[in-house]
Amino acid sequence: MKLHRGYTILSLMIAMAIGIFITGVAGKVYIDSKMAFLMRSAVAAANENGRFAIEDLRRSLVMAGRGVGAGDDDLTAYTATTDNGLRTFPMVGAAGIVDSDAISGSSVLAVRYATGPSCGGVIAASSTVRFLVNADSELECEVNGVSQPIVSGIVQMRALYGVDTDTDGLANRYLTATEVEAGDFWPNVVSIRVGLIASSGEFELPLSHRPSAAETFDLLGMDVTAPDTSHFFKSVTTTFSLRNLNTVVERQ
């Protein structure tokens, strides 16, 4: 009697089912790994943009008032109708400090100092240094009217000025530029608190990790809603001590 060897239809169907299951598992592991990688890349990009922006701001802002005479920073200089070009903080307005820029909605920071690092270089004469966020979500550094972008992925910037009201060298209140101006507090400013909303820039979140609605951040007391849900956004806040403006510390 001749025996017939081979595979039955049932065994082939079982083998195919097992193969499809293994392929599906491998595909899911690959997709999950890729989504996790994209998520980590977006988070890392936002963290990096925020960190670079803070460090670039720090290098310039901590120099505020360097080489500016104490007499140029007195109350008379700040209550005068025109800016004498010698004090640490330019006048509040379009060409100087602005609480909320008409284009970006961000604060515009501006300080003066005689020498020090700024915009990737070193300034060797009394200069006005401004920081602002442009329409392309880039943090710009401007020296004497010449600007250049230094960090991308910065959606919003807000600045508050620390006012020392009891001459102990520490800020007792943090106010907007307009509030400082209204109270004639510029000679009492000893620090600047800066808040940023940094985005992941060119790195988008995978669809599975996108929030259902745009997030809202508390940026130094101001609510800021993220412009979209396709990117990762992070709030970064820090305070810069201005040693050259501190009456307890000798000016440089």
Image (tube, helix red, strand yellow):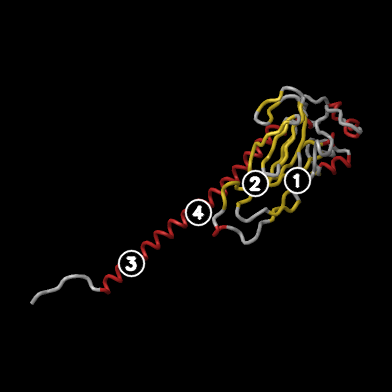
The amino acid at mark 4 is Ala
Quarter residue 88 falls in: top right
Which residue is disc 2 drawn over?
A: 198
Nearer to the camera, 222 or 228:
228
Quarter of the image with the N terminus is bottom left
Which residue is at 72% across, 42% downward?
Answer: 194
Which residue is disc 1 drawn over?
A: 103
Residues under labels 3 and 1: Cα distance? Answer: 59 Å
Quarter of the image with the C terminus is top right
Query: In the rendering, which numbered label is found on residue 18?
Result: 3
Name the N-terminal-most of marks 2 and 4.
4
In the displayed structure, would residue 122 be above or below residue 212? above
Query: Residue 32's x, y, as percent?
Result: 47, 57
The amino acid at mark 3 is Ile
Label 4 sits on a secondary structure element that is helix
Quarter residue 82 falls in: top right
Label 1 sits on a secondary structure element that is loop
Residues under labels 2 and 4: Cα distance? Answer: 20 Å
Name the N-terminal-most of marks 1 and 2.
1
